[in-house]
Image (spheres, helix red, strand yellow):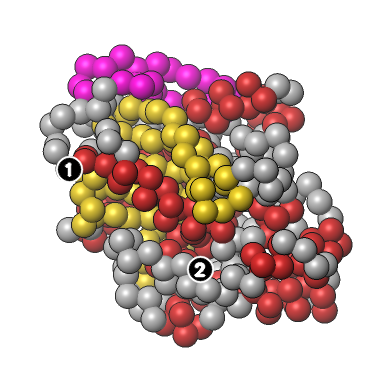
Amino acid sequence: MYQHLIGASKFVILLAAFLLGSVVYATELYPVGLKQLNYVDSERSNWQGNGPRPLSGLLWYPAKKGSKVEDLDIAIFKVGKFAIKAAMSEDVAKMPLIVISHGTGGSAATMSWLASTLSSEAYLVAAVNHHGNTAVEEEKRAEGFLAWWERPRDISVLIDRLLQDPEIGPRIDTHRIGVAGFSLGGYTAIALGGAKLNFRNWVNMCKSEEGKTQCQLPPEATFSRQDALNLLEKPGPFQTILAKSDDSYRDPRISAVFLIAPVLASYMQPESLSSIRVPVRIVVGDADDQAPLERNTRVFAQQIPNANYQVLSKVGHYSFLPVCSMTGKIAAKLYCNDHADVDRANIHALVGQQALDFFKRELH
């Protein structure tokens, strides 16, 4: 999403992905530690077909009190305070784990504002950069943008790897694992809760109603609508992956789901939504043109038992991205400019606190 604004070199892009965050607005119990994760899924190939699927990402955690924190600013973003690679606090033996899925074309780091709020309250928080659909990779792939169902698999494997990690695994309370997701990451999260796609409905709608908003490619896409349709229809390895689109990706380890401006509700199997039994909380803005309220949040809320939602006045889709610098507000207006009455930092603080309250209540 942000390569053209951060710089040309891969090093700078990866550095931004590692350090990118947002200001921590809640009162901290712990400094927020930050470290990079580098796992792979050996059971799936990367989109180039020459190696395993990468699962790079970030881990936020409560660092030892007194750990040195750094104020970080990267390119167009206001970056928060992190104790980079600091030792983890020993105050709590076992901690809840929250896994987060970023939006289309974004990165794990774009959700730092949410992760920071949770980690400062003694939560372990991890997010993965979804391969082929993330700003930390030099190449965005149409497969990564279209194979949405590969994302919940990323999260499940991420949980596996974290539990197997000799330093992180012993600190996870396996009875208290939740998931959060923004935009397409909202689909990721609800799929882990039990929602199943009806992908063919989406494909057929795109063929017959080209002009409809829900069929338009997101602004982060680097390919055309026709390129997408060609990939979906031509013979090749992608057809094997496509055949798994409507499978269940429910992860029974997930006990609570927090959605931020989720999408794709109209293309879910209704019976799968009505069968979800984990608690679901949704937050969305009424000025969201990427995840319109009527076709997404309200559909989820009406069909999922025990789901509830809040609508934030004048808040748009990209208000849930990190706080931008003045340069960003000038050079990247789509991602950085909010309604005059909306303070993005305040929105992050509000939603972060709601997520914290939700997980404290539901993960017990």
Residue 211, placed above or below residue 133: below
Q: Which residue is mark 2?
A: 297
Q: Quadrant of the N terminus?
A: top right
Does residue 302 appear anywhere in the picture? no
Q: Residues within 10 Å of mark 2 (few under 14, many from 20)?
A: many
- Which amino acid, by three-letter code, is at mark 2? Thr
Asked if the residue at tag 2 contacts the one at tag 1, i.e. Cβ–Cβ closer than 8 Å, the answer is no
**Residue at the image point whose x is 38% and y is 21% from the top:** 84
Q: Quadrant of the C terminus?
A: bottom left
Q: Nearer the viewer, mark 1 or mark 2?
A: 1
Q: Earlier in the sequence, mark 1 or mark 2?
A: 1
The residue lying furthest to the bottom in this view is: 271
Viewer-closest of 133 and 70? 133
Secondary structure under the numbered disc 2 in the rendered image: helix
**Residue at the image point whose x is 36% and y is 34% from the top:** 60
Give the quarter of the image for residue 230. bottom right
Give how far apart the Cα atoms at labels 1 and 2 are: 33 Å
Q: Which residue is mark 1?
A: 94
Range drawn in magenta: 64-86
Image position, residue 170 (x, y; %) = 21, 41
Residue 128 painted magenta? no
Residue 73 painted magenta? yes
208 left or right of 99?
right
Does residue 3 appear anywhere in the picture? yes
Secondary structure under the numbered disc 1 in the rendered image: loop
- Which amino acid, by three-letter code, is at mark 1? Lys
**Residue at the image point whose x is 57% and y is 45% from the top:** 52
259 left or right of 47?
left
Viewer-closest of 338 and 299? 299
Image position, residue 178 (x, y; %) = 33, 55
Image position, residue 262 (x, y; %) = 53, 61
Image position, residue 225 (x, y; %) = 82, 61
